[in-house]
Image (cartoon, rainbow, N blue to C red):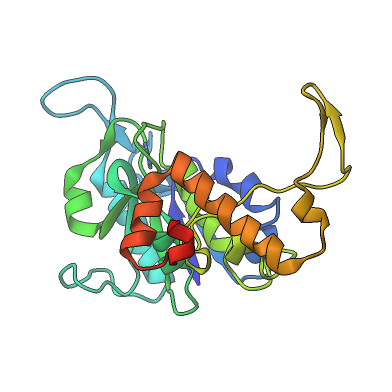
Amino acid sequence: MRFDVITLFPELLEPWLAAGVTRRAFASGAVQVRLWSPREFAQGAYRRVDDRPFGGGPGMVMMAEPLWRCWRAVRADRGLPPRRVGKTQPEVPTVLFSPAGRRLDHAQVARFAAADSPGAILLCGRYEGIDQRFVDACVDEELSLGDFVLSGGELAALALLDAVARLQPGVLGDEGSAVQDSFHPALDGLLDCPHYTRPEVWNGPAGPQGVPPVLLSGHHARIEDWRRQQRLLRTARARPDLLEAARVAGRLSSEDLA
Ligand code: ADE
């Protein structure tokens, strides 16, 4: 799958894509990422990409024309026609990151990460926003990282790319581990359980702390039961909404609910 990221700051994204666990997904081409700067498509001696908002107010707004030229170049590079007809079923979705979007969650990430996903054109907003005419004409969906405002969509684009990469088969050292992550449907969308490693007793600021004995028992069924209980407890405490969603979806057994 291929992701084209339109950003005024490609240099912010490059180091992240070149490092870390997900590097393999990008280096192997399993997830192709190309970075595009609208500034290269801007006109005039100053290659202006932003201007003051009509109606007044603080900040600057990203101009429609350089974005459109850049977006067309991306589409041409992907072998797509310069325009789309209507907004239904785009061949490749154009996604704008902004606080006004739907909140990104596991289901959305899984959709972009699926084997038959074409990827997306990811647009990182900056300044006070983007000329709405470009959004109306070219954007298919808006996604937000959460109920707070970032100084741009770059971190949100990286968050999506990172999450997509780690869902690709073979990208994580232990192939199964994405399946055991928080929010994964394989674990009914619950939060992950706590983890422990050596030493068995750690002398830290709280004094000697042991490991839950069941984890040392070697009894796999009991360990699995304990992990399930911990996931349920953690989710009930921190994210009762997820527990309720699992209950409504019929994913909790009578033992879980006890
Ligand atoms: N750009 C600015 N704030 C954002 C947010 N919360 N999510 C995604 N993109 C953003």
Res 200 quadrant in image = top right
Residue occupying the far bottom of the picture: 116
Residue 212 is left or right of residue 54, and the answer is right
- Looking at the picture, how far across and down is residue 231, in whole percent? 55, 52
- Say which of 36 and 13 sits in front: 13
- Say which of 104 and 73 sits in front: 104
Residue 8 seen in the current view = no
- Identify the residue at image location x=39%, y=47%: 38
Residue 153 seen in the current view = yes
- Identify the residue at image location x=46%, y=40%: 237
- Looking at the picture, how far across and down is residue 25, in whole percent? 64, 65
The answer to whether 27 is drawn above or below residue 158 in the figure is below
- Identify the residue at image location x=81%, y=47%: 197
- Looking at the picture, how far across and down is residue 62, in whole percent? 29, 38
Res 210 quadrant in image = top right
Residue 163 is left or right of residue 17, and the answer is left
Residue occupying the far front of the picture: 258
The answer to whether 184 is drawn above or below residue 59 in the figure is below
Which quarter of the rendered picture does the C terminus lie within?
bottom left
Residue 45 is left or right of residue 132, and the answer is right
Q: Quadrant of ligand 1?
A: top left
- Looking at the picture, how far across and down is residue 164, in whole percent? 52, 61
Tell me how many marks there are.
0
- Say which of 43 and 208 sits in front: 208
- Say which of 93 and 217 sits in front: 217
The answer to whether 69 is drawn above or below residue 97 in the figure is below
